[in-house]
Amino acid sequence: MNLTIRPKLELLKKELIEKIIEEAYIILEKQGVYVENIEALELFKEAGIRVDDETQRVFITSQLVEDSLSSTPSVIKLYDRSGDKEFIVGEDEVHFDPGSTAVTIIDHKTQEQRKALTEDLVKFTRLTDCLDHLHFQSTGIISSDVPEIISDSYRLYICLQFSEKPIVTGTFRVEGFKPMKDMLVAVRGSEKALEERPLAIFDACPSPALKWSNLTTQSLIDCARAGIPSELISMGMTGATSPVTIAGTLVQHVAENLCGLVICQLAKKGAPVIFGGSPSSFDMRKGTTPMGAIETMMIDSAYAQIAKHLNLPTHAYMGLSDAKINDSQAGLETGIGAVLAALSGINVISGPGMMDFESCQSLEKLVIDNEICGMAYRLIEGISQREDPIATNLFDGFTKETQFLSMPHTRKWYRQEHIFPRVIDRDTYDYWVSLGKKSMDDRASEEAEKILRENSPSLLDKNIFQELHKIMLSDARNNSFSALPEIKIGSSPKELIGS
Amino acid sequence: MLKGRSMNRKMRKEKLKKEKNTKERIVEKEKNRNKLNSKGENVSKEELLTKMKKSIIEGNKDEAKALAREAVEKHVDLNEAIDEGYVPGIQKVGDLWEEGEYFLPELITSAECMKAAMGVLKPELKKAQIKAKSLGKVVIGTVEGDIHDIGKSLVSSMLSANGFEVIDLGADVKLEKFIEMAEAEDADFICLSALLTTTMLGQKKFIELLKEKNLFGRFKIMVGGAPVNQKWADDISADGYAENAMTAVKEAKNLLRK
Ligand code: B12
């Protein structure tokens, strides 16, 4: 008999879950949702849904929501770049990936935020590729040395070249989808192969309250048809763009995401959808959207519980911080978030590395957060009975001198029962002094450099990369840019790709 | 038991004392009012102005509107009502915000009260052909391709509450539209908000467009939004930048002096 339990966090009583869903259904049907996309409006009409053409408002019946829910897969399989390694997105599987789409990066030397360059994006991608507890890659940073108009496809291009892991990404413009999909298809070999073995998830945000913009609706439709999983990122801000109470924001969250889910199913029955989000407890004093607030995490954990009740894969922006440097706030907010997310059994957890209200990435923080994720994984593994008896036999012949260090039992289990962090400090005081009294941030910076120095990048096959490069170049040219930045592959300046 | 009773008695005594105090105060107030009343309608005007200020501070929209109507009926100098009634109210609100007393819901509610009161007063000023005092006319919006409008609306509310005349074009606004509106309204400021690194480019394009149309220099251009900073504003030769809604008001006032 397996005596291990997986520790679990549940914030909502079943009755409250049902009440929230019921109110979301009422809103979808009575208030309706603005859907600013002609193609989606047509799909709704074909499904017999009342559409107000003038205001682009759709009134979604509970029946259609129910039908859509029943055709949505409860588990998605994602595959790495090689197509060999499979990741289950569903049930209580937990996968961490870096927080996505930062505008800036922390420069460790100056401790200041600055715009990121291609070189930073490459480092970030390679580092993520090497960090064990980050199962997925994300197109985490915008590089400022390419025209902003192509920044969505460009970050995917870099990611595919330098990492083996599945990717969380998304479009910034309607036209961005095609080159991005073409690159994914190029990696897989055919559209069918991509559909069978999805390699990337595309994020799409509704606009609170109760609106789906043209861009993100189009992303849902395009992804559904290509078999690419869409991650629905409702993001109410309590008291600003959604009701101020946590339960009230949950009602809106469920309504918005369900509308997105219906659009996906109308575009293609059985399309993979992940119930995600990036809501926040809006700070009424500062006008900011703290991701590290405990109330933000409560909303996340609760909507994930609702999504599980609906049998859907889940996602959240957790395990990140609003701190501006790698200080104790950075660690505490990330730590609490990652642990709560893991305990909530959220399938895709985007956050590591991220700070300053989802706007800044840090390589050092990424290294630190990787250890936090490791702790979270250890926690949800729970406590197991490894042997029978558990321990009585270890006390056979017990005397005052008995110690456990040299027991075969210790040797056998210590690496499985305990994890060994690399940058978390467990030195004695004197030894720490002798190492130069380094801060966590400094140790993490050294570790990041070491990882990048010692691991060669997991590069994409040369021929496939040539295809990607062609796609990227033509996207750039369509937007009247002819040259892409040169990319340094390894440490040698001679190893360059690009034009 | 005994102790309790004596306490009760003590409390009752205190209470009586308090009641007496308030009664005395009311009588005194009444006396004062009579005193002032002899000076004529001044009193009711002073009172009206005080109430106006209070309505803004407390965020009472119906009251703010009702007082504006009362001012119209009583033929109070409307510019005085604005300058000495409502504006001190919103200034106090700004102070309370900076002191950390007031949070956004109070700030925005007060700004909306201000707007509501102005909504009553402005048509009247126009009817009477009195020029409404304004620090300047502002055309504001979020640039095309960008639907983030929360920050923009905050800036817009605070500018208007602080005496600017604001024309808010909303979100996802075509660059040409800003120019059209600013020309038609003879605006002093154009404020562009952008939250995406892609749409931030629109701010740069906008200034190029102004140059193309030989309109550069005619309006003061302010830019803002999360990815925007002072350096970007300088790079694209915008006149002003602000990090949040309160500093946006300060920056706009600064630019007036330039
Ligand atoms: C809320 C939000 C949304 C909401 C917007 C709702 C709405 N009605 O506005 C929704 C869900 C719709 C949304 C959508 C998207 N978003 Co968004 N969003 C945010 C978020 C979390 C908060 C923005 C906000 O309202 N802040 C609160 C207000 C009060 O602050 P503020 O806007 O900065 O404004 C203040 C100042 O900047 C200043 N200010 C603002 N404007 C002006 C103008 C002037 C003249 C002046 C002087 C000052 C000034 O004063 C304001 C008040 O103090 C940010 C994260 C962030 N850190 O900003 C991401 C963020 C901006 N979004 C982002 C993205 C990518 C998107 C999407 C593309 C996602 C997608 N793929 O679906 C879409 C874009 C849709 C589109 N075409 O615009 C990215 C941008 C990344 C980038 N490099 O460009 C961010 C940074 C998040 C992230 N890291 O991923 N988003």
Image (tube, coloured by chain):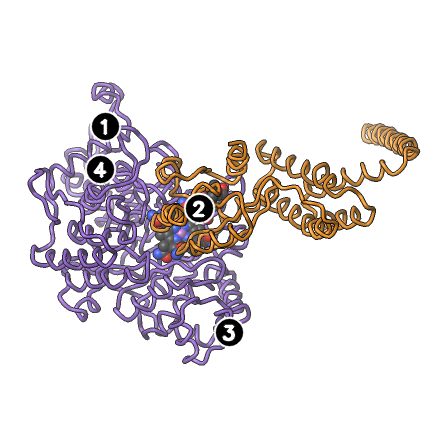
Look at chain A in the picture and name its colour: purple
Secondary element at image label 2: loop
- Give the letter of the chain under mark 2: B
Same chain under badges 1 and 3? The reply is yes
Assess whether mark 4 and mark 3 are in contact (beta carbons under 8 angstroms). Answer: no
Q: Is mark 1 within 8 Å of ligand 1?
A: no
Most foreground residue, A34 or B80 = B80
Q: Amino acid at mark 2?
A: Leu
Quadrant location of residue A358? top left
Residue for badge 2: B215
Q: Amino acid at mark 4?
A: Phe
- Give the letter of the chain under mark 4: A
Considering only order in the chain, which callout, 3 or 1, is on the residue closer to the N terminus?
3
Report whether residue A121 is seen. yes
The image's mark for residue A400 is 1
Label 4 Cα neighbours within 10 Å, binned few <14 / some 14-19 / many ≥20:
few
Look at chain B in the picture and name its colour: orange
Secondary element at image label 3: strand
Considering only order in the chain, which callout, 4 or 3, is on the residue closer to the N terminus?
3
The answer to whether residue A152 is above or below residue A25 is above
The image's mark for residue A52 is 3
Q: Amino acid at mark 3?
A: Asp
Residue for badge 4: A420
**Distance (Cα) linking label 2 and label 1:** 91 Å
Assess whether mark 3 and mark 1 are in contact (beta carbons under 8 angstroms). Answer: no
Q: Residue at x 84, y 39 (%)?
A: B44
**A449 lies left or right of B41:** left
The answer to whether residue A438 is above or below residue A289 is above
Q: Nearer the viewer, mark 1 or mark 3?
A: 3
The image's mark for residue A293 is none
Q: Nearer the viewer, mark 2 or mark 4?
A: 2
